[in-house]
Amino acid sequence: MDFNLKEEQQQFADALRRWTERDYSFETRRQIIHSPAGVSEQAWAGLVELGMTALPVPEAQGGFDGSAVDMLVVMQELGRGLVVEPYFATVLGAQFLKLAGGQQRRLEQVAAGELKLACALGERQARHDLADIAVAAAKEDGGYRLSGSKTVVIHGAEAGALIVSARSGGSQRDRRGISLFVVAPDAPGVRISGYRTLDGQRAASIDFDQAPGELLGREGEGWAVLEAATDYGATLLCAEALGAMDAIFVATLEYLKTRQQFGAPIGKFQALQHRMADMFIHLEQARSMVMLAAVKVASDDAEERRRVVSAAKARVGQAARFVGQQAVQLHGGMGVTDELPAAHHFKRLSMIELTLGDVDHHLERFIAQPGFRPQNEAAR
């Protein structure tokens, strides 16, 4: 398999890296996350101008019909630059719209950068089980009314539309009976409480009290779309983590070359060289798994998609923890200070590991897939 980037992909990566270096420096980012809004309309306009919002949208809706591999290139650069704009949340929402169908107008708005999306999927009692849904959707006057609460909705307060999973039938953890809805954040009965997360991103808690919702797809059959879209989102998060790990590895290597101890750069000490070698191995193993997930996430074989995406998310989570911890230790006391980009990369890596399923969740999901154990062993 050829893992070299195509010319168009390399151009996207180069353009985005130039933009982050010129217009989204570390100091600029710090000013943005400490601003009242926590995001920058100017930065969002820059992403739109570069074509990033149009990249994953189908050509028929004014986009470039980019694949997950194309998005891998973009998310790596966003991870390297620690970009906090609501790009991931919007792209994940757009994937829901594409898979559910019938959302051409909203996809056109996403491509043009006119509509930001957020996905309200998690609930307090559910941890990482996206099928554990207590938010209820009831039919009323030919429409639907949603009641319940969603937690840690990434960029929920910045979105122009919310993609919400709710239960229209079945018991709380059934996969049948799950429906998806588009909800306007300013609709009656919607209450949004935004806050800043550990890594400088924005999230929100959202309460629904008989809030009107527009059905997305078919009633009670939303699980397939929910699972496929979040697998896509998990793959993008893995790519973002890869970019962050690349940045933190380079920064640590540079630090070891310049920090002096006993009259020599500490990078000359063999023990530290071994630790850098271990970081590199973890990074490259993660890179291989992310590439595989980007290729397989669009597979028609749902079992293969689940297996590969969970393997990638688990491996990236393990690598992120190791690389981040080693980087902090090798930087010494500076490794945990707010002034050092490495500390912010480590915080972002920690949050990525917890988003859309942590290591333990995806290991359990991986081993639950058919074919993991021999039939005679599984029957014991």
Image (cartoon, rainbow, N blue to C red):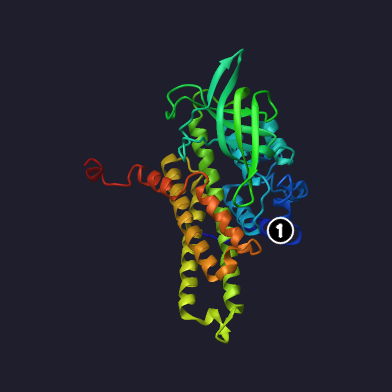
Location of the C terminus by quadrant is top left
Query: Residue at 72% of width from left, 62% of height from top?
Result: 21
The percent coordinates of residue 278 (x first, y second) are 46, 69
Q: Is residue 75 above or below residue 192?
A: below
Closer to the camera, 347 or 181? 347
Mark 1 surroundings within 10 Å by alpha-carbon count, few (fewer than 14), some (14 through 19), many (20 or more) = many
Closer to the camera, 231 or 250? 250
The percent coordinates of residue 256 (x first, y second) are 57, 76
Q: Is residue 228 visible?
A: yes
Q: Which quadrant of the structure image shows residue 334?
A: bottom right
Q: Which quadrant of the structure image shows residue 172?
A: top left
Q: Which quadrant of the structure image shows residue 64?
A: top right
The number of numbered badges drawn on the structure is 1
Q: Residue furthest top?
A: 141
Query: Residue at 76% of width from left, 61% of height from top?
Result: 22
Residue type at mark 1 is: Thr
Horizontal side, residue 30 vs residue 136: left or right: right
Q: Is residue 121 above or below residue 41?
A: above
The percent coordinates of residue 123 (x first, y second) are 51, 35
Query: Residue at 64% of width from left, 54% of height from top?
Result: 78
Question: Which type of secondary structure does the marked residue at label 1 adopt?
Answer: helix
The percent coordinates of residue 53 (x first, y second) are 69, 45
Q: Is residue 74 above or below residue 254?
A: above
Q: Residue furthest bottom?
A: 263
Label 1 sits on residue: 20
Q: Is residue 1 visible?
A: no
